[in-house]
Amino acid sequence: MESYQLGYFVAVAEEGGFTAGAARLRLAQSALSQAIRNLEESVGAVLFNRGRRGASLTAAGSALLPLARDILGRMRQAAVAAREAG
């Protein structure tokens, strides 16, 4: 599991789909989809129900979302703390 994958996961969850998530991240939708597939393989669970009208979180995705947000927030805090200490 990579931090960028968690960021991508959060973007898709918040935007409600891969197309909107890719636009937000300024990525090709295919690259975003592949990164999410790789994340799903890494965690061993499907994170999104994919459909024509977007993507919704599965139970596994719902469990991961608050943790992913927390991890990303802590990473930002760590960077700020290091900058301020340096």
Image: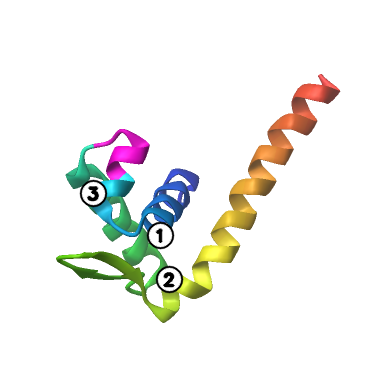
Circle 1 Cα neighbour tier, 10 Å, few/some/many (<14 / 14–19 / ≥20): many
Disc 1/disc 2 C-alpha distance (Å): 8 Å
Secondary structure, mark 2, is: helix
Q: Are marks 1 and 2 in contact (CB under 8 Å)?
A: yes
Q: Which residue is mark 3?
A: 19
Q: Which residue is mark 1?
A: 13
**From what the image shows, is residue 42 above or below residue 35?**
below
Rendering coords of residue 15 (x, y %): 37, 53
Query: Residue drawn 34% across and 59% down?
Result: 16
Rendering coords of residue 64 (x, y %): 51, 68
The span picked out in magenta is 22-27
Comparing marks 2 and 3, which lies closer to the viewer? 3
Marks 1 and 3, the one that precedes in the sequence: 1
Where, quadrant-wise, is the N terminus in this rendering?
bottom left
Secondary structure, mark 1, is: helix
* Dot label at residue 61: 2
- Residue lying at the far right in this picture: please name it: 85
**From what the image shows, is residue 81 above or below residue 72?**
above
Q: Answer whether residue 26 is magenta in the image.
A: yes
Q: Amino acid at mark 3?
A: Thr
Q: Depth check: 79 or 22 in front?
A: 22
Residue 77 appears in which quarter of the rendering? top right
Marks 1 and 2, the one that precedes in the sequence: 1
Q: Amino acid at mark 1?
A: Ala
Rendering coords of residue 4 (x, y %): 44, 43
Disc 1/disc 3 C-alpha distance (Å): 11 Å
